Image (cartoon, grey):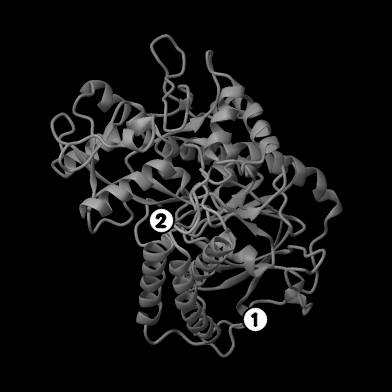
Amino acid sequence: MLLTKIQILIKKVDFLVIGSGIGGLSYALKAAKFGQVCIVTKSNQDESNTKYAQGGIAAVMYSPDSHEKHIADTLNAGAGLCDEAVVRMVISESSERIRELIEWGVKFDRKSSGEFDLAKEGGHSEHRILHFKDVTGFEIERALLNQIHAHPNITLLDHHFTIDLLTQHHLGVEVNSRTPGIECYGAYLLDLKSGKVETVLAKTTLMASGGAGHAYATTTNPTIATGDGVAMVYRAKGKISNMEFFQFHPTSLYNPGEHPSFLISEAVRGFGGILRTLDGAEFMNRYDPRGSLAPRDITARAIDNEMKLRGDDYVWLDCTHLEQDDFIRHFPNIYRKCLSLDIDISKDFIPVVPAAHYMCGGIAVDMNGRSSIRNLYAVGECSCTGLHGANRLASNSLLEAVVYSHRASMDAGHAIGSVEWKQGIPAWNAEGTAHPEEMILITQSLKEVQAIMSNYVGIVRSNIRLERAFDRLEILYKENEALYQETTVSSRLCELRNIINVAYIIIKQAMLRKESVGLHYTIDYRNKS
């Protein structure tokens, strides 16, 4: 049955938060001091990239570590494209944000002495990763959701898909990327249980929608990571930056047929795991003096190169020499997963392969999380703050999210008194649309996009590959936009639309980057990372 304007619900909130990861939840807890908050998420309330973050959160806790060392490591990983002022700000504010997480109930692992049991990961010069076993993100989600449920000013709507942001465009004003003063008034939400589309008006909106790993065929991201936030802001004519820098995690578990890919944490190599080719030879020292502890872009390229040279489908991660009880204590989830596949880490190597993991670019924001669109903020993986530059340093992502959610909540909270709900926004109109007769039109297009991105816009690129990807994506874009205009809105249709938008941005910005740097490694230019 088609939706009519009579069926549409219109709601008003002070703060609309799109996404329920660490960025959205921590922002909501602080914004709730200033007004009513509504968090919307398209899946279960705890389903986010945060939940699957195994390694932990980077922060300076003890000497001989220092802020200057953490800053230097971050700048080095970013291959010269980090915003140093942002790097210094995030790292200098890290201790206070960690303290707040602990006060909210996050239980980081400690030694018998009471000190934090800090891990070391690729690209870090010191042990500075706070963690809870190998399920740190799950622990953070648990603690934050407990706080959210107890707060009277916060409502959490799960299984609500955000279709598009509301701007002047919805008032009949022509808007393009050069239009000054674009404003956000809220969003259209699809209730996935009832099928109704709600118009939600908000004084201020936060985009905390996570990543876009499912633009690729193989990814460690949960199935919800379809680039929704970046695509929505792009369609609203907001500024998007650095999307060519897409990080591939070097060590996802090689297990054909499992989607998404199971992540073998970077911390395993920090713990002493060694990468080997299938004949058992260690190879990382030929690529970087840090060996298996090299940053992710170098490690992923090295593995990719070894696989192509040798014609292998994966490489080994050797943990057999490690103290097994300590390994199981630090990585119980990884241990159980391997054991379920008859991999005994005490005597068997772990088969690993790179997989799409983290989006280093996104919605361009300032140091308070403000996007180029008024009353629209962005934090977490969907944002581009300048912290990561051309390559993310391991475990800096959760830190970035809590620092920016704090700054954005304070900025939005103090500004909200001068903002009113916009009048005259039309309700969602589905007249003239119908349910798709053939779902194959959606599922096959998704497979094609993912194949294009994996084959032409992956770990190693070239100009001819990017041009070919752009041409093929153009056809898929036109086909899907026509389908979108005539089809009743659904999450699968919208996700495909968003993935196509994000893939286009990645390709376009990669074509404009006339150098090889960091995660954008192209054979046509000399590498600068």
Nearer-the-camera pick, 140 or 462: 462
Q: Position of residue 518 (x, y in %)?
A: 50, 46
Q: Which mark is residue 460?
A: 2
Q: Is residue 425 visible?
A: no
The quarter holding residue 131 reads: top left
Q: CA distance from mark 1 to mark 2?
A: 49 Å
Q: Give the residue pinned by disc 1.
A: 5
Q: How many discs appear?
A: 2
Q: Residue at x 42, y 9 (%)?
A: 113
Q: Position of residue 147 (x, y in %)?
A: 56, 37
Q: Residue at x 59, y 63 (%)?
A: 512
Find numbered disc 2 in the image and state the secondary structure of the residue it sits on: strand
The quarter holding residue 163 reads: bottom right
Q: Position of residue 354 (x, y in %)?
A: 34, 49
Q: Residue at x 74, y 59 (%)?
A: 373
Question: Mark 2: which amino acid?
Answer: Val
Q: How crowded is the residue under tag 2: few (<14 C-alpha within 10 Å), some, or many (20+)? A: some
Find numbered disc 1 in the image and state the secondary structure of the residue it sits on: helix
Question: Mark 1: which amino acid?
Answer: Lys
